[in-house]
Each structure stands twice: as C-alpha cells, then as structure tokens.
Image (tube, rainbow, N blue to C red):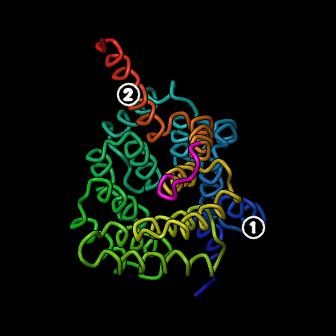
Amino acid sequence: MASDPLFEVRNAFFIGNYQHSITEGQKLKGLNQEQKLERDLLLYRSYVAQRKYGIVLDEVSSVSPDELQAVRLLAEYLSSPANKAAVIKKVETKLTAGVDVSNDVFLIMAASIYYLEMQYDQTLRVLNQSDSLEGHALRVQTLLAMSRLDLAKKEVKAMQEKDDDATLTQLALAWFNMGVVSHLGGEKYQDAYYIFQEMADKTTATPLLLNGQAACYIHQGKYDDAETSLQEAIAKDSNNAETLINLIVVSQHLQKPSEVCNRYMTTLKDSHPNHAFVKDYITKENEFQKLAQQLQLVQP
C-alpha cells in the first residue's frame, strides 16, 4: 500500500499540533489535486484553530473549492460576534437548499457551528448525513454534551469497526471513558489518561492532550498532578481557553491565593471574551452583584 503523504499533517491537526500541521503541509511537494485540496483544508483549519481568521478570510474566496468555502464560513463565524447570525443564516440556507453529502467538510463545519451554539439536536441532524470518522467523532462529542452515554458508546463502537487505530477513534474512546461515571469511573479515567499519554509519547504533548490528561487527574482528585500537566500546557500556549479554565478549577481545589485564580480569569476574559464559560461566568457575576445590592437595600 502506498504511503499517505498527508498522514503527519492530518494527525498533527487532530491532536492539536496546529503549527506543525501547517509547517509540514507547506513542505509537501508532488501532491495530486485531491491531496492538494486536503492539504489546503488542513492548513486553513489549523489557521482557524490558531484564531488566525484573517488568513482564511483573505485567501479563500467565492471561486475557491466548495470545501474551502465551508472552512471560510467557520472562520467568519468565529472572527466576530457580529458575524454569527449572518453565518448561521447562510448555513441554514445551504441546508434548506439541499446539501451535497459528498462535501463532508461542509457538514463538519456546519455541525461545528451548531455545536458552538449549543444547538445539539441540530448538530446531530447535520451529522446524520456524514459517515466519516470525523463526523462520528463530532457526534460522540455532541452526545456526551447531551449526557447520552448510551448513544455515544454506539458511535465509538462504529468508529472502532471502521478504524480502531485511527487517532480520532482513540480520542473519541478517551472522551467516552471520561464520561463514564459509574462504579467503573476510576478505571475508565485511567484508561483515558493512558490514551492521551500514548499519543503524547508517539508525537508531542500538545495542549489538547495535556488538558485531556489534566481532566483525568481532576476527576480522580489528583489536583497536584493536574496542575503539573496544565503548567506544561500553558507553557506551550499561554492563551489556550481550556488550559486557563482547568487551571481556575485546579487552583480552587488547591486553595491557591485568590489573585492566582483572578489572574487566570482575567487572561481568559481578555483572550476569549465570547467563550461560553466566560459568558456564563459574567452572567452569574452580574446576578450575584444584583442580589448583593438588593440585600444591602433591605438591611435596616
């Protein structure tokens, strides 16, 4: 079987090593048209993951392949809160008009937008048309967000039947194991940890993998170990939202000084003002302040 020239580029993207995916993708020569398109997709999706939306918006136009235009939609959605409603309208129009199911990239991008909107039922409706490993993996994430472990388990099994050794399959298995909170919970968290560790050993410890390990430690109450993983993650990307959120959680459990948690929260607010965690925190913060004012007013 001929070697896959895009394996390293694709694998780096899936484990969150976005700059490596870009660097290695730009080195590739002698690709056929299909391979060039997939390479470009991985590069532009990596730029989106790095929040370099301007590159995608500048370079992908109406004459670009449909798959690249789908990535542009996600870049538009993420680039500014003011764009979100218009992008969702575009997605809905395309879905209503009928989707070319061979354009799996559009299905993944559209489902990702609905997932970020927390419209999980709509996410699943879009993904029902996708039979790719990535489509299955996003279904697993969505079902876990809905606390449907029973259905997530079926999706993981379908992925294992397709390609048990694939990076996405192993990641989905780790996510599922972290979602199991039965009497087997501790064992499953350890299984998930080993998956993240094996991937890190084979490639490199990315913030995505380190946060996965930290989440396993947090679930097991091993907060010092979690902090070690998170400090390694933040050294690689000081503005990573998941790292900052997990550091806030761990710092609370370790009873760190309040200024430590506040520092992480301020960084998170500055770097990711539209993150769901930040929006929810600010809402609760405002509600608390209103209640405090009301209590002051009723005091004699």
Label annotation for residue 67: none
How far from the left and from the top, in percent, is residue 157? 30, 76
Q: Where is 53 relative to 187, above or below?
A: above
Residue at (71% x, 59% y) in the render: 235
Specify the farthest residue to the bottom. 1
- Of the residues shown, which amino acid type is indicated by label 1? Leu
Label annotation for residue 288: 2
Q: Can you see residue 245?
A: yes
Q: Where is 190 relative to 43, above or below?
A: below
Residue at (56% x, 62% y) in the render: 208
Q: Quarter holding the C terminus?
A: top left
Q: Where is 182 relative to 145, above or below?
A: below
Q: CA distance from mark 2 to mark 1?
A: 54 Å
How far from the left and from the top, in percent, is residue 122? 29, 44
- Is 152 displayed left or right of 70 in the figure? left
How far from the left and from the top, in percent, is residue 19? 71, 58
Residue 27: in magenta span: no
Instruction: Decide which of 70, 173 is in the foreground and name it.
Output: 173
* Of marks 2 and 1, the one in the foreground: 2
Question: Which span is picked out in magenta?
Answer: 252-258
Instruction: Decide which of 226, 36 is in the foreground and name it.
Output: 226
- Of the residues shown, which amino acid type is indicated by label 2? Phe
Looking at the rendering, which quadrant does residue 283 occupy? top left
How far from the left and from the top, in percent, is residue 4? 62, 77
Residue receiving disc 1:
28
Residue at (55% x, 34% y) in the render: 273
Instruction: Decide which of 144, 159 is in the foreground and name it.
Output: 144
Q: Quarter holding the N terminus?
A: bottom right
